[in-house]
Image (cartoon, grey):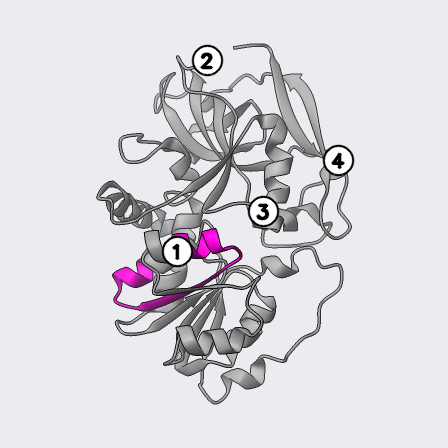
Amino acid sequence: MTNTNREWVLAARPDGEPDLDCFELRETDVPSPNLGELLVRTRYLSVDPYMRGRMRDAESYAEPWDVGDALKGGIVGEVIESESDAYDAGDLVTGEGRWADYATLDADDVAPVDPTVADPEAYLGVLGMPGRTAYFGLLEVGEPQPGDTVVVSGAAGAVGSVVGQIAKRNGCRVVGFAGTDEKTEWLTDDLGFDAAINYKTTDDYGDALDAAAPDGVDVYFDNVGGPITDAVFTKLNLDARVAVCGQISHYNDEEVPTGPRKLPQIIAPRAKVEGLLVSDFATRFEVASERLGEWVAAGELRHRETVVDGLENASDAFLGLFAGDNIGKQVVRVAPASGEE
Protein backbone atom coordinates (compact mmCIF):
# COMPACT_ATOMS: atom_id res chain seq x y z
CA MET A 1 0.00 0.00 0.00
CA THR A 2 1.26 3.47 -0.90
CA ASN A 3 0.37 6.87 0.53
CA THR A 4 -0.84 8.13 -2.84
CA ASN A 5 -4.40 7.73 -4.02
CA ARG A 6 -5.56 8.42 -7.57
CA GLU A 7 -9.11 9.71 -7.91
CA TRP A 8 -11.27 10.77 -10.87
CA VAL A 9 -13.24 14.02 -10.59
CA LEU A 10 -15.75 15.76 -12.83
CA ALA A 11 -13.67 18.44 -14.55
CA ALA A 12 -16.43 20.02 -16.68
CA ARG A 13 -20.07 19.47 -17.53
CA PRO A 14 -20.57 18.01 -21.00
CA ASP A 15 -22.47 19.61 -23.83
CA GLY A 16 -24.09 16.67 -25.57
CA GLU A 17 -21.94 13.57 -25.58
CA PRO A 18 -19.22 13.63 -22.90
CA ASP A 19 -15.56 13.55 -23.89
CA LEU A 20 -12.27 13.12 -22.05
CA ASP A 21 -12.15 16.84 -21.20
CA CYS A 22 -14.99 16.21 -18.73
CA PHE A 23 -12.74 14.08 -16.52
CA GLU A 24 -9.59 14.67 -14.51
CA LEU A 25 -7.46 12.13 -12.65
CA ARG A 26 -6.01 13.71 -9.51
CA GLU A 27 -3.65 12.49 -6.80
CA THR A 28 -4.78 12.68 -3.19
CA ASP A 29 -3.79 11.13 0.11
CA VAL A 30 -5.06 7.70 1.02
CA PRO A 31 -7.98 8.29 3.43
CA SER A 32 -8.12 6.89 6.95
CA PRO A 33 -11.23 5.07 8.19
CA ASN A 34 -13.21 6.42 11.13
CA LEU A 35 -15.02 4.28 13.66
CA GLY A 36 -17.45 2.00 11.82
CA GLU A 37 -15.70 2.47 8.47
CA LEU A 38 -13.50 0.38 6.22
CA LEU A 39 -10.54 1.40 4.13
CA VAL A 40 -11.08 -0.48 0.88
CA ARG A 41 -8.68 -0.95 -2.00
CA THR A 42 -10.72 -0.95 -5.18
CA ARG A 43 -10.43 -4.14 -7.22
CA TYR A 44 -13.19 -3.37 -9.73
CA LEU A 45 -15.37 -0.33 -10.34
CA SER A 46 -18.57 -0.01 -12.29
CA VAL A 47 -19.39 2.47 -15.03
CA ASP A 48 -23.10 2.77 -15.85
CA PRO A 49 -25.24 4.78 -18.28
CA TYR A 50 -27.25 6.45 -15.49
CA MET A 51 -24.08 8.30 -14.46
CA ARG A 52 -24.53 10.56 -17.51
CA GLY A 53 -27.49 12.14 -15.71
CA ARG A 54 -25.31 12.93 -12.69
CA MET A 55 -23.10 15.05 -14.93
CA ARG A 56 -25.94 17.51 -15.60
CA ASP A 57 -26.70 20.55 -13.48
CA ALA A 58 -30.28 19.44 -13.00
CA GLU A 59 -32.40 17.55 -10.53
CA SER A 60 -32.67 13.83 -11.19
CA TYR A 61 -33.36 10.61 -9.33
CA ALA A 62 -29.57 10.39 -8.79
CA GLU A 63 -27.95 13.39 -7.12
CA PRO A 64 -25.94 15.40 -9.66
CA TRP A 65 -22.20 15.82 -9.26
CA ASP A 66 -20.72 19.28 -8.92
CA VAL A 67 -17.71 20.20 -11.01
CA GLY A 68 -14.71 19.13 -8.97
CA ASP A 69 -16.58 16.33 -7.20
CA ALA A 70 -15.16 12.82 -7.06
CA LEU A 71 -16.99 10.43 -9.38
CA LYS A 72 -18.81 7.63 -7.59
CA GLY A 73 -20.31 4.26 -8.40
CA GLY A 74 -20.39 0.63 -7.47
CA ILE A 75 -17.10 -0.99 -6.52
CA VAL A 76 -15.76 -4.34 -5.40
CA GLY A 77 -12.77 -4.00 -3.15
CA GLU A 78 -10.55 -5.60 -0.55
CA VAL A 79 -10.66 -4.39 3.04
CA ILE A 80 -7.22 -3.01 3.93
CA GLU A 81 -8.08 -1.60 7.34
CA SER A 82 -11.23 -2.16 9.38
CA GLU A 83 -12.70 -0.02 12.14
CA SER A 84 -15.74 -2.30 12.34
CA ASP A 85 -16.34 -5.69 13.94
CA ALA A 86 -18.33 -6.73 10.85
CA TYR A 87 -15.34 -7.08 8.50
CA ASP A 88 -11.66 -7.95 8.72
CA ALA A 89 -8.68 -6.98 6.61
CA GLY A 90 -8.61 -9.19 3.52
CA ASP A 91 -12.41 -9.46 3.17
CA LEU A 92 -13.98 -8.66 -0.19
CA VAL A 93 -16.93 -6.27 -0.14
CA THR A 94 -19.11 -4.38 -2.57
CA GLY A 95 -20.76 -1.01 -2.15
CA GLU A 96 -20.87 2.59 -3.36
CA GLY A 97 -17.38 4.02 -3.63
CA ARG A 98 -15.28 6.47 -5.58
CA TRP A 99 -13.50 6.06 -8.88
CA ALA A 100 -10.26 5.77 -6.93
CA ASP A 101 -7.56 3.38 -5.82
CA TYR A 102 -8.74 3.59 -2.21
CA ALA A 103 -11.93 4.70 -0.51
CA THR A 104 -13.49 4.65 2.94
CA LEU A 105 -16.91 3.01 3.16
CA ASP A 106 -19.34 2.72 6.03
CA ALA A 107 -19.41 -0.94 7.08
CA ASP A 108 -23.22 -0.79 7.29
CA ASP A 109 -23.43 0.19 3.61
CA VAL A 110 -21.46 -2.68 2.07
CA ALA A 111 -22.18 -6.34 1.40
CA PRO A 112 -19.82 -9.31 1.38
CA VAL A 113 -18.54 -10.77 -1.88
CA ASP A 114 -18.34 -14.55 -2.14
CA PRO A 115 -15.90 -15.52 -4.94
CA THR A 116 -17.07 -19.15 -4.72
CA VAL A 117 -20.41 -18.08 -6.23
CA ALA A 118 -19.00 -15.96 -9.06
CA ASP A 119 -15.95 -13.90 -9.93
CA PRO A 120 -15.84 -10.65 -7.94
CA GLU A 121 -16.64 -8.47 -10.97
CA ALA A 122 -20.00 -10.22 -11.32
CA TYR A 123 -21.08 -8.45 -8.12
CA LEU A 124 -21.19 -5.23 -10.17
CA GLY A 125 -23.37 -6.85 -12.83
CA VAL A 126 -25.61 -9.88 -12.57
CA LEU A 127 -25.20 -10.04 -8.77
CA GLY A 128 -25.31 -6.28 -8.30
CA MET A 129 -27.49 -3.33 -9.19
CA PRO A 130 -28.05 -4.34 -12.85
CA GLY A 131 -29.13 -7.86 -11.88
CA ARG A 132 -31.55 -6.58 -9.26
CA THR A 133 -32.90 -4.03 -11.75
CA ALA A 134 -33.61 -6.83 -14.22
CA TYR A 135 -35.15 -9.06 -11.54
CA PHE A 136 -37.60 -6.53 -10.12
CA GLY A 137 -38.17 -4.63 -13.35
CA LEU A 138 -39.27 -7.72 -15.24
CA LEU A 139 -41.05 -9.68 -12.54
CA GLU A 140 -42.73 -6.80 -10.68
CA VAL A 141 -43.36 -4.32 -13.51
CA GLY A 142 -43.40 -6.53 -16.60
CA GLU A 143 -45.31 -9.36 -14.90
CA PRO A 144 -44.42 -11.99 -17.53
CA GLN A 145 -46.72 -14.96 -17.96
CA PRO A 146 -45.89 -18.29 -19.63
CA GLY A 147 -46.41 -17.96 -23.37
CA ASP A 148 -45.89 -14.19 -23.41
CA THR A 149 -43.60 -12.56 -25.94
CA VAL A 150 -41.04 -10.35 -24.20
CA VAL A 151 -39.01 -7.82 -26.19
CA VAL A 152 -35.89 -6.28 -24.66
CA SER A 153 -33.97 -3.28 -26.02
CA GLY A 154 -30.33 -2.97 -25.05
CA ALA A 155 -30.54 -6.74 -24.67
CA ALA A 156 -26.79 -7.41 -24.67
CA GLY A 157 -26.16 -5.00 -21.80
CA ALA A 158 -25.85 -5.70 -18.11
CA VAL A 159 -29.59 -5.36 -17.42
CA GLY A 160 -31.09 -6.57 -20.69
CA SER A 161 -29.12 -9.81 -20.81
CA VAL A 162 -30.45 -10.79 -17.39
CA VAL A 163 -34.00 -9.70 -18.24
CA GLY A 164 -34.10 -12.01 -21.25
CA GLN A 165 -32.85 -15.01 -19.31
CA ILE A 166 -35.33 -14.52 -16.48
CA ALA A 167 -38.11 -14.20 -19.05
CA LYS A 168 -37.05 -17.53 -20.57
CA ARG A 169 -37.16 -19.08 -17.09
CA ASN A 170 -40.77 -17.90 -16.93
CA GLY A 171 -41.73 -19.67 -20.14
CA CYS A 172 -41.72 -16.66 -22.45
CA ARG A 173 -40.64 -16.13 -26.04
CA VAL A 174 -37.81 -13.57 -25.87
CA VAL A 175 -36.65 -11.16 -28.57
CA GLY A 176 -33.69 -8.84 -28.05
CA PHE A 177 -32.35 -5.76 -29.82
CA ALA A 178 -28.58 -5.28 -29.88
CA GLY A 179 -26.05 -3.40 -32.00
CA THR A 180 -23.65 -5.97 -33.50
CA ASP A 181 -23.82 -9.46 -34.95
CA GLU A 182 -21.51 -10.65 -32.16
CA LYS A 183 -24.03 -9.43 -29.62
CA THR A 184 -27.07 -10.92 -31.33
CA GLU A 185 -25.28 -14.26 -31.67
CA TRP A 186 -24.42 -14.17 -27.96
CA LEU A 187 -28.07 -13.57 -27.13
CA THR A 188 -29.38 -16.48 -29.18
CA ASP A 189 -26.51 -18.96 -29.01
CA ASP A 190 -25.41 -18.50 -25.39
CA LEU A 191 -28.30 -16.93 -23.50
CA GLY A 192 -31.19 -18.73 -25.18
CA PHE A 193 -33.08 -15.78 -26.67
CA ASP A 194 -35.51 -16.97 -29.34
CA ALA A 195 -34.56 -14.17 -31.73
CA ALA A 196 -32.30 -11.14 -31.82
CA ILE A 197 -32.33 -8.08 -34.08
CA ASN A 198 -29.25 -6.07 -35.00
CA TYR A 199 -30.73 -2.59 -34.96
CA LYS A 200 -27.74 -1.08 -36.76
CA THR A 201 -28.17 -3.26 -39.85
CA THR A 202 -31.98 -3.45 -39.85
CA ASP A 203 -33.79 -0.97 -42.08
CA ASP A 204 -37.33 -1.55 -40.82
CA TYR A 205 -37.78 -2.42 -37.14
CA GLY A 206 -41.48 -3.06 -37.65
CA ASP A 207 -40.86 -5.71 -40.28
CA ALA A 208 -38.14 -7.26 -38.14
CA LEU A 209 -40.54 -7.47 -35.19
CA ASP A 210 -43.22 -9.05 -37.34
CA ALA A 211 -40.77 -11.83 -38.16
CA ALA A 212 -39.28 -12.22 -34.66
CA ALA A 213 -42.50 -11.67 -32.68
CA PRO A 214 -45.32 -12.78 -35.02
CA ASP A 215 -47.85 -12.90 -32.18
CA GLY A 216 -47.17 -9.34 -31.05
CA VAL A 217 -45.56 -8.04 -27.86
CA ASP A 218 -46.88 -8.72 -24.37
CA VAL A 219 -43.98 -7.27 -22.37
CA TYR A 220 -41.50 -4.65 -23.50
CA PHE A 221 -38.47 -3.95 -21.31
CA ASP A 222 -37.09 -0.65 -22.56
CA ASN A 223 -33.47 0.33 -21.90
CA VAL A 224 -32.99 2.46 -25.00
CA GLY A 225 -35.96 4.52 -26.21
CA GLY A 226 -35.91 6.17 -29.63
CA PRO A 227 -36.92 4.48 -32.90
CA ILE A 228 -36.78 0.97 -31.41
CA THR A 229 -39.38 1.91 -28.83
CA ASP A 230 -41.48 3.67 -31.47
CA ALA A 231 -41.62 0.42 -33.45
CA VAL A 232 -42.38 -1.81 -30.47
CA PHE A 233 -45.30 0.36 -29.37
CA THR A 234 -47.09 -0.39 -32.63
CA LYS A 235 -46.92 -4.13 -31.85
CA LEU A 236 -48.30 -4.13 -28.29
CA ASN A 237 -50.92 -6.75 -27.52
CA LEU A 238 -54.00 -6.38 -25.36
CA ASP A 239 -53.01 -5.69 -21.74
CA ALA A 240 -49.33 -5.36 -22.66
CA ARG A 241 -46.90 -4.13 -20.03
CA VAL A 242 -44.01 -1.75 -20.73
CA ALA A 243 -41.22 -1.40 -18.18
CA VAL A 244 -39.23 1.78 -18.83
CA CYS A 245 -35.81 1.22 -17.28
CA GLY A 246 -33.56 3.48 -19.36
CA GLN A 247 -33.40 5.75 -22.39
CA ILE A 248 -29.73 5.66 -23.31
CA SER A 249 -30.41 6.83 -26.87
CA HIS A 250 -31.46 10.20 -25.38
CA TYR A 251 -28.98 10.65 -22.52
CA ASN A 252 -26.74 12.98 -24.51
CA ASP A 253 -29.56 15.02 -26.06
CA GLU A 254 -29.41 18.72 -25.22
CA GLU A 255 -32.99 19.30 -26.41
CA VAL A 256 -36.05 17.13 -25.99
CA PRO A 257 -36.32 15.13 -29.23
CA THR A 258 -39.57 14.89 -31.14
CA GLY A 259 -40.85 11.69 -32.68
CA PRO A 260 -43.95 9.55 -33.03
CA ARG A 261 -46.47 10.20 -30.28
CA LYS A 262 -46.70 7.01 -28.25
CA LEU A 263 -49.81 7.60 -26.16
CA PRO A 264 -52.29 6.80 -28.96
CA GLN A 265 -50.54 3.45 -29.39
CA ILE A 266 -51.46 2.31 -25.86
CA ILE A 267 -55.18 3.12 -25.98
CA ALA A 268 -56.49 0.19 -28.01
CA PRO A 269 -54.34 -2.46 -26.29
CA ARG A 270 -54.99 -0.85 -22.87
CA ALA A 271 -51.27 -1.20 -22.25
CA LYS A 272 -49.61 -0.29 -18.97
CA VAL A 273 -46.43 1.81 -19.18
CA GLU A 274 -44.47 2.14 -15.95
CA GLY A 275 -41.08 3.61 -15.14
CA LEU A 276 -38.90 1.86 -12.63
CA LEU A 277 -36.08 2.68 -10.24
CA VAL A 278 -34.43 -0.27 -8.57
CA SER A 279 -34.06 1.73 -5.35
CA ASP A 280 -37.82 1.40 -4.85
CA PHE A 281 -37.23 -2.28 -4.10
CA ALA A 282 -34.38 -1.73 -1.63
CA THR A 283 -36.12 -3.52 1.22
CA ARG A 284 -36.12 -6.69 -0.88
CA PHE A 285 -32.64 -6.52 -2.38
CA GLU A 286 -31.53 -9.49 -0.29
CA VAL A 287 -34.28 -11.67 -1.78
CA ALA A 288 -33.24 -10.83 -5.34
CA SER A 289 -29.53 -11.24 -4.59
CA GLU A 290 -30.10 -14.66 -3.05
CA ARG A 291 -32.19 -15.87 -5.98
CA LEU A 292 -29.79 -14.50 -8.60
CA GLY A 293 -26.85 -16.02 -6.74
CA GLU A 294 -28.52 -19.43 -6.73
CA TRP A 295 -29.12 -19.28 -10.47
CA VAL A 296 -25.56 -18.16 -11.21
CA ALA A 297 -24.02 -20.80 -8.94
CA ALA A 298 -26.13 -23.49 -10.60
CA GLY A 299 -25.08 -22.35 -14.08
CA GLU A 300 -28.68 -21.43 -14.92
CA LEU A 301 -28.02 -17.71 -15.36
CA ARG A 302 -25.14 -16.74 -17.59
CA HIS A 303 -23.28 -13.46 -17.45
CA ARG A 304 -20.45 -11.65 -19.15
CA GLU A 305 -18.29 -8.71 -18.21
CA THR A 306 -16.31 -6.44 -20.52
CA VAL A 307 -13.22 -5.56 -18.48
CA VAL A 308 -11.08 -2.49 -19.09
CA ASP A 309 -7.75 -2.57 -17.25
CA GLY A 310 -6.43 0.36 -15.25
CA LEU A 311 -8.03 3.13 -13.21
CA GLU A 312 -6.48 5.59 -15.67
CA ASN A 313 -8.80 4.16 -18.35
CA ALA A 314 -12.06 4.50 -16.38
CA SER A 315 -13.20 7.55 -18.37
CA ASP A 316 -12.64 5.67 -21.64
CA ALA A 317 -14.66 2.75 -20.29
CA PHE A 318 -17.52 5.08 -19.39
CA LEU A 319 -17.53 6.78 -22.79
CA GLY A 320 -17.50 3.36 -24.43
CA LEU A 321 -20.97 2.69 -23.04
CA PHE A 322 -22.43 5.23 -25.49
CA ALA A 323 -20.58 3.66 -28.41
CA GLY A 324 -21.86 0.20 -27.49
CA ASP A 325 -18.37 -1.16 -26.81
CA ASN A 326 -19.47 -3.49 -24.03
CA ILE A 327 -21.09 -6.89 -24.08
CA GLY A 328 -22.72 -7.56 -20.73
CA LYS A 329 -21.45 -5.42 -17.85
CA GLN A 330 -18.75 -2.81 -18.40
CA VAL A 331 -16.28 -2.77 -15.48
CA VAL A 332 -12.81 -1.42 -14.82
CA ARG A 333 -10.16 -3.61 -13.19
CA VAL A 334 -8.34 -1.24 -10.87
CA ALA A 335 -6.06 -3.60 -8.92
CA PRO A 336 -5.22 -7.30 -8.92
CA ALA A 337 -6.05 -9.60 -6.05
CA SER A 338 -3.65 -9.86 -3.13
CA GLY A 339 -0.66 -11.94 -4.10
CA GLU A 340 -1.17 -11.28 -7.84
CA GLU A 341 0.84 -8.06 -8.07
Query: Mark 4, mark 2: which one is toward the viewer?
Result: 2
Along the polypeptide, which appears first: circle 4 or circle 2?
4
> Circle 3 is placed at which residue position?
321
Along the polypeptide, which appears first: circle 2 or circle 1?
1
Q: Does residue 239 sit above or below 18 in this rendering? A: below
> Circle 1 is placed at which residue position?
187
User: Mark 4: which amino acid?
Assistant: Ala
User: Mark 3: which amino acid?
Assistant: Leu
Q: Does residue 3 sit above or below 78 in this rendering? A: above
Along the polypeptide, which appears first: circle 1 or circle 3?
1
Q: Nearer the viewer, residue 92 or 237?
A: 237
**Quadrant location of residue 262?**
bottom right
Tell me the number on the disc at residue 341: 2
Range of the magenta residues? 166-186
Q: Does residue 80 sit above or below 138 in this rendering? A: above
Q: Distance between the residues labelled 4 and 2?
A: 31 Å
Element class at badge 3: helix
Along the polypeptide, which appears first: circle 1 or circle 4?
4
Query: Mark 1, mark 4: which one is toward the viewer?
Result: 1
Tell me the number on the disc at residue 11: 4
